[in-house]
Image: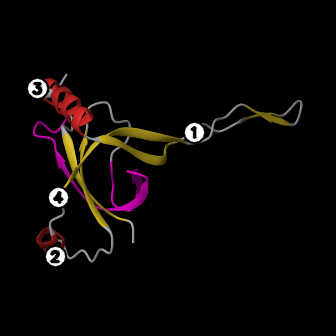
Amino acid sequence: MSLYTQDAADALADIAEAGGVVTFPGAIPGTAPTYTEATDTWSGGTAPTDAAGSALKLDSDPNQYRALSLVLTNPITLLIAGYGLLVTPRPGMPMGFGGATYTIKNVDDLNPAGDQSILWTVIGDAG
């Protein structure tokens, strides 16, 4: 258990109350089917599934985009709760929020102990 587990849980509760759902399509890998040589058949296996979490939309900051050398056409900045999220946001990943799909361009992680993310500030672009 991290020194910041309660802080992460509190952040999740606050963001869930004030924000919305963010999804990461296909981010949780599925399992491969099993081959049975005797019957020459494949069985089982699961398809990848979406990861979901809680996010709060922040006001966009064009100065931050310029400082990061990001050229965005339809940007969004989200504060995403880390507690219980089954995926780590990474640049290049797709994410859905508010009915739109974005590509993650930048991620900042608040993880003071290095063992549990409290939250991520994620910049995405739908353009």
In the picture, the disc for residue 3 is: 3
Cα–Cα span, label 3 and label 4 = 30 Å
If the image is split into quadrants, where does the C terminus sit? bottom left
Residue name at image x 10 percent, y 26 percent:
3
Q: Which residue is mark 2?
A: 66
Residue name at image x 70 percent, y 36 percent:
33
Would you identify the image quadrant in which residue 38 lies? top right
Residue 95 vs residue 82: left or right? right
Cα–Cα span, label 2 and label 3 = 35 Å
Q: Earlier in the sequence, mark 3 or mark 1?
A: 3
Q: Which residue is mark 4?
A: 59
Q: Nearer the viewer, mark 4 or mark 2?
A: 4
Would you identify the image quadrant in which residue 60 lies? bottom left
Mark 1 nearby-residue class (10 Å; few <14, some 14–19, many ≥20): few
What's the magenta region? Answer: 89-115
User: Could you tell me which secondary element the residue under label 4 belongs to?
Assistant: loop
Q: Nearer the viewer, residue 62 or 30?
A: 62
Residue name at image x 38 percent, y 36 percent:
86
For residue 9, above or below residue 120: above
